[in-house]
Image: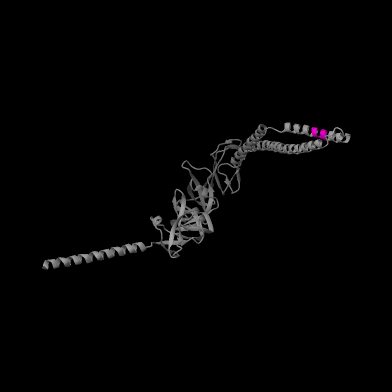
Amino acid sequence: MKLAVKMTKKRWIALIVVIILIASIGGCYMQAANYKPALTATTAGKQELKSYLSTSGVVTNGTLDEYILPASTVVQSVNFEVGDTVKAGDVMVVFDNSDAQDDYKRAAIAYEKVRLQLDDAERQFFDTKEEIKELEEDIAWLKEKMDEWEDYSDPDSMAKYSNYYSRWESAKAKKETLENSIPSDESLKIQQLTYEEAKMTMDEAEEALAKLPANFTAQHDGVIESITVSKYGQAAKGQVAVTVRTTDTTTVDIRVGRFDINKIEEGQPAVITVANVDYEGSVAYINPIADAESYVKVQVKIDNPEGIIPGLDADVDILTYAAESVLALPSESVKTDRNGDYCYVLTPSPEDPSLYTPVRTYITTDHSSGTLIEVTDGLEEGQLVVTNPPANIDAIPVCTATLLS
């Protein structure tokens, strides 16, 4: 009897433990069901944005300017010799582009003639069509008048009938003559093709002329180190015609790859850092020819180079884009997939304005800095955007938001 009582107590204890466990698990499930993850967000707004191309190079004093031929041409005159001193603006080599200019003029004249002929043919075509249409209306009206006065027993009626008949016959004959004079569709097509061919020839001649080099003018003060062209000689594309060792500049020579060279323009401001000291400068020269590795030589001039030792390494930040007020997002807010760039916009819940739904929103982006990306389409100023979307954000139906200042 005592053993049975002990067994009953154990069962009661076990039952109580099970109840406690069930209550604990249920509470956890309730907490999980009510849990709303907190995401950090920022308000999309207008901001100042600056983009830089950051690279490095070597400080040089007395840089070597190379004047490279972008196309083959004929040299008309060479105005200096090796060792001569030149000033910025001096014309060193004059090219004879007269043959290309004549070719372009001839092509332009031929094009204009063909254009005028085509315009005249098309004008005559439509004018004749319109005249034929008017004659058809006259012919129909004269036929009606003939029917009205066709009374052989009345001399007055016959006289009027004869007059309308004569005019009717004349209008028909004129209509037939005009119809025979209309150029065929094949004839107009040939003229159109002739026009297009003449335009293509003129465009090619203009393009060939545009590629020819302008006279080589010294960009800086300096001394001529080499001249590889001669008067009346043929100069080849890619040939280094003249080199000038400059005497008035301190620059940093850098190499820019093919993916970045289109961002660079002469005159762009730059910050040059040498031995932890910052100097202001600007892009002074862009080589028109890339090297064998598809890099382009660029020289950045240092405005106040006092104290800089040539040969030192330098970090260069070239300002490639600047805008005072553009719609921009933090870089970490923007993601990319095969459909394009996107961010997550927080849409307020209609039931509870403190809760949000993150919505993937595709946007169009443009310039970027190290921390900001410009948005040109797909986003409006004032919208809440998740700043650093977690990997599982697409599985989050509802969340709270912590707005960053």
Q: Magenta residues: mostly which secondary structure?
A: helix
Residue 305 in sight: no
Residue 378 place in picture, x, y as percent = 51, 55
Residue 329 place in picture, x, y as percent = 47, 58
Residue 163 place in picture, x, y as percent = 84, 35
Front one among 274 and 267: 267
Residue 120 place in picture, x, y as percent = 71, 37
Front one among 382 and 284: 382
Above or below, 103 relative to 296: above
Front one among 53 and 311: 53
Please state, as top left, top right, bottom left or bottom right, where the C terminus lies in the image. bottom left
Name the quadrant containing residue 228: top right
Q: Is residue 398 left or right of residue 63?
A: left
Please state the extent of the stretch shown in magenta in the rendering. 164-169
Above or below, 151 relative to 381: above
Name the residue rendered at 80%, 34% in the picture. Answer: 168
Q: Is residue 80 left or right of residue 305?
A: right
Residue 165 lies in the magenta stretch: yes
Front one among 20 and 294: 20
Residue 145 lies in the magenta stretch: no
